[in-house]
Amino acid sequence: GESVGLHLPTLSVQEGDNSIINCAYSNSASDYFIWYKQESGKGPQFIIDIRSNMDKRQGQRVTVLLNKTVKHLSLQIAATQPGDSAVYFCAENTSASKIIFGSGTRLSIRP
Amino acid sequence: DAGITQSPRHKVTETGTPVTLRCHQTENHRYMYWYRQDPGHGLRLIHYSYGVKDTDKGEVSDGYSVSRSKTEDFLLTLESATSSQTSVYFCAISEPPTGNTGELFFGEGSRLTVL
């Protein structure tokens, strides 16, 4: 079926450390994956995306890794800052721009 | 920020009443989406549109209908609201590059409470 899930609902990280948020998906035909960040009271905002013909993509302080063999993707945030506190969602394009989201991971930063 | 306006931003209504949420965009994007967000469920796709008068169902479409009579507006209607439809509703838009999928831009959300 079409589902996107997350391993952990919450993640606590020391400020300055790297954060890794994981996501599993079930649709082998999905060809595009996106990570979104949602701050309290706001709509989700795009962070980074990756197409199925890639296994790694880097942005500013963020890296997304895609492992199609085990249907897993991860978001790595380098040098985590207080402003990174938010809920992070992975999403997949299951077919024809039908974008399905996972349930989210709440990232909190310890000073 | 993408030009997306949702209205109303907050609404309280009673069970059995009809409710319409409006999403208005000024970006001329082809795709528009309605999601609902509930604790523990993340964002769930209700309906989406890939052009004027072209719509399709999402994951949780029962109890909802949509209409898109012009590019800039996508309406979500609850014909007879139920308490289970209490949620925050997000509209999103996208303009995929030819042959690809594009990122979604989200509105600020509409909080609906059904008593």
Image: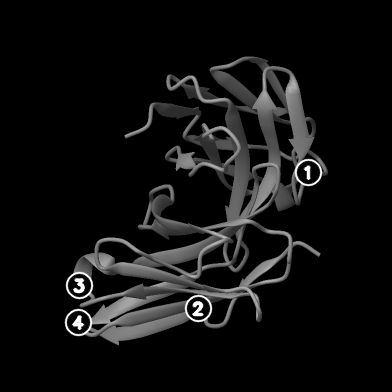
Mark-to-mark CA distance, 1 and 2? 28 Å
Q: Amino acid at mark 4?
A: Glu
Q: Amino acid at mark 1?
A: Ser
User: Viewed as shown, does residue A83 lie left or right of A40?
Assistant: left
Please tell me the numbered disc located at residue A15. Answer: 4
Q: Residue at x 28, y 82 (%)?
A: A18
Q: Residue at x 63, y 72 (%)?
A: A5
Q: Residues within 10 Å of mark 2 (few under 14, many from 20)?
A: many
The disc, 4 or 2, on the residue closer to the chain's N-terminal end is 4
Q: Is residue B37 above or below residue B81?
A: below
- Residue under label 2, please give it: A22
Rendered location of residue A67, percent (x, y): 57, 76
Q: Chain of mark 2?
A: A
Q: Chain of mark 4?
A: A
Q: Residue at x 43, y 47 (%)?
A: A43
- The mark lying in front, picked from 2 and 3, is 2
Mark-to-mark CA distance, 4 and 3? 6 Å
- Residue under label 3, please give it: A81
User: Viewed as shown, does residue B86 lie left or right of A105?
Assistant: right
Please tell me the numbered disc located at residue A46. Answer: none
- Residue under label 1, please give it: B61
- The mark lying in front, picked from 4 and 1, is 4
Mark-to-mark CA distance, 3 and 1? 38 Å
What is the quadrant of residue B51 in the picture? top right
Quadrant placement of the C terminus of chain B: top right
Q: Amino acid at mark 3?
A: Gln
